[in-house]
Amino acid sequence: MSMDMTTVGEPGLLDTLQHEVAVFARRAEQTRLGGVGQVRNSMDRAAYLLLNRLDKEGPMGVKALAASMGIDSSTVTRQVAPLVDTGLVKRTSHPEDGRAVVLQLSPRGQSRLEEVRSSRRQLMDELTHDWAPEEREVFCALLTRFNSALSARMAVPGTETSSAS
C-alpha cells in the first residue's frame, strides 16, 4: 500500500521525516561523514563537493562551476581559494580566451580526493554493513530523489529555506 506523504491527514509521518532529516543533517555536519582512519574529518564538505565536481566535469571557470553547483560565483571564489593555496586546484588560462581563468583539479587534488572518497566509501560500508544490497540501492535512490527535489525547490525563486530553520 502506497502512502501519500503530502496528505494532510498524515502529519505524524511528515513530522518523523522532517525530524530524521534534521538529525541526519546534524550528524553529517558533526562527522562531516568524513570517513574512517587518518582521513576522517580531513576535508570539509565545500572542498569535497568542489573537488568532486571538477573531477566529474573537468576544468571550468568559476561561473560555470558555480552554476553547476547551484551556488553563486562569490561563494565558489571564496571556497576555492584555500584549495588553490594548498595545491589541490590549479588556476590556468582558458585555452581559447587567455584572459579567462579555468579551475582544474591538480594531480595532488586528484590523489587527495581519491583518498577521501576511499575513506568515505569505507564509512558507508561500515554504516550499512548489515543492509541487504537491495536496501542500499533503495536508500541511495530515495536519497538521490530527495536531494534532487530539494535542489529543484531551491532553484525556484522565493522557495529558499531559511538557514535558521
Image (cartoon, helix red, strand yellow):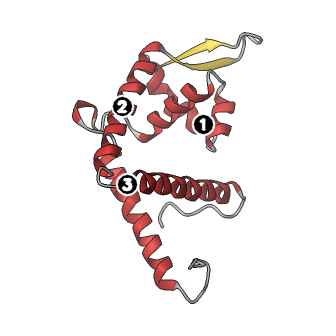
Number of the front mark, 1 or 2: 2
Number of the front mark, 2 or 3: 3
Q: Position of residue 29 (x, y in %)?
A: 36, 51
Alpha carbon separation for disc pair 2 and 3? 21 Å
Q: Earlier in the sequence, mark 3 or mark 1?
A: 1
Measured along the vertical axis of the image, is residue 75 above or below residue 114?
Answer: below
Q: Position of residue 155 (x, y in %)?
A: 69, 54
Asked where in the image residue 3 lies, by quadrant, the reply is bottom right
Which residue is at the front of the view, 57 or 29? Answer: 57
Q: Identify the residue at the far bottom of this view.
A: 9
Number of the front mark, 3 or 1: 3
| Mark 2 vs 3: CB contact within 8 A | no
Helix, strand or loop for disc 1: helix
User: Mark 3 — residue?
Assistant: 132
Measured along the vertical axis of the image, is residue 58 above or below residue 48?
Answer: above
- What residue appears at the point 45 percent right and 34 percent down from the top-left corner? 47
Helix, strand or loop for disc 2: helix
Alpha carbon separation for disc pair 3 and 1? 43 Å
**Crowd class of label 1 (few under 14; some 14 to 19; many from 20; radius 10 Å):** few
- What residue appears at the point 49 percent right and 15 percent down from the top-left corner? 106
* Residue type marked 3: Ala
Could you say which disc has been placed on residue 124 in the image?
A: none
Which residue is at the front of the view, 21 or 96? Answer: 21
Could you say which disc has been placed on residue 74 in the image?
A: 1
* Residue type marked 2: Ser
Tell me: 106 left or right of 121.
right
* Residue type marked 1: Ser
Tell me: 50 left or right of 99.
left
User: Mark 2 — residue?
Assistant: 118
Q: Quadrant of the N terminus?
A: bottom right
